[in-house]
Amino acid sequence: MSTAAHQATYPVELQAQVEDYLSSLAFTDEPSITGLVEAMRYSLLAGGKRIRPVLALATGKAVGCDTRELLPLAGALEMVHTYSLIHDDLPAMDDDDLRRGQPTCHVAHGEDVAILAGDGLFAEALRLLLCDQAEAPGRVLAAALELVTAAGTEGMVGGQYVDVSAPDDLEPEALRRLHELKTGRLIGASVGCALLLAGETGSATIALRRFAAELGVLFQIVDDILDVTGDEAELGKPRGSDERHGKRTYVSMFGLDEARRLAGESHAKSRAALAEAGGHTQELERISDYILTRQT
């Protein structure tokens, strides 16, 4: 796919809604906290495709919601994701100096402030969802529970622990499980929380959640491929980070050609799930296509 076609696939109109909303978030007007807020916004507004919040808006659109009504959820998802990136980049974790083409938060603001910026973003994400998401309280609480579960020990943080403690001889099933937790659960929550807020309980939700699960696998396989083949200027960070840290990836375990085949298989499964779900899933289809062909 050409670069132009590749970029056109992505629902940039939903991405623009997310960007505008994130830019409007101020967190606090307390003068003594200005430096912390600057660090939080530094990482939060650093760009990227905003895949998780865009997924939430696209899911809402698929089931007939006004996407503007889901912006607090979208913002909360991106804030949780950004917090995880800030902490991933720290010297004690991946020790990366660049993220999205600019110095990482701890390089720009200091390690102590970066840790607090990540903590602050996680807490503010929950406050945003609980205070600003205008749905029935039961629906908002259900979405908040799914989000924190996806972020915690049964999701992202648990997967991060498995990642840093995994043995060198990790089996394929364990590798998939690692990434189901570390990457897949928050991607799944992006779809699941939108369904909960919309009050969707029909059979289509099963297919949409299966789509989200397969999309998480697809995202990670492609991410592993790009760590080997991607252009550093487009990636916005040094290539080969996984190899430098001795991490097991889909490429190191299966080889580049097989990893590409597995990506195609996951993409096909995600599209099949959308076909089963029915409804207005065009934006979700475009996201799946984009992830398969992405270059950054």
Image (spheres, grey):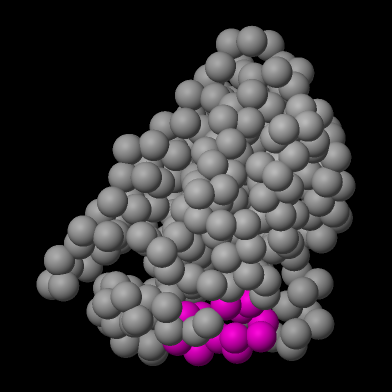
* Image position of 128 with respect to 137: above or below: below
- Residue at screen point 48% across, 62% down: 89
Between residues 126 and 35, which one lies in front from this camera angle?
35
Task: Label the magenta part by its dominant secondary structure.
Answer: helix
* Image position of 47 with respect to 37: above or below: below
Residue 37 appearing in the image: yes
222 relative position to 257: left or right: right
The image position of residue 267, as x and y in percent, is 51, 67
Between residues 220 and 61, which one lies in front from this camera angle?
220
Q: Does the magenta stretch include residue 283?
A: no
Range drawn in magenta: 226-237
User: Is the C terminus in the top left, top right, bottom left or bottom right quadrant?
Assistant: bottom right
Residue 216 appearing in the image: no
The image position of residue 271, as x and y in percent, is 56, 60
- Residue at screen point 63% across, 63% down: 108
- Residue at screen point 50% across, 55% down: 111
- Residue at screen point 58% across, 36% down: 120
95 relative position to 62: left or right: left
The image position of residue 186, as x and y in percent, is 49, 45
* Image position of 63 with respect to 286: above or below: above
52 relative position to 250: left or right: right
Q: Given the current orientation, which residue lies at the most extreme top position?
A: 137
* Image position of 206 with respect to 257: above or below: above
Q: How many tags in the picture?
A: 0
Q: Is residue 231 magenta?
A: yes
The image position of residue 66, as x and y in percent, is 83, 33
User: Is the N terminus in the top left, top right, bottom left or bottom right quadrant?
Assistant: bottom right
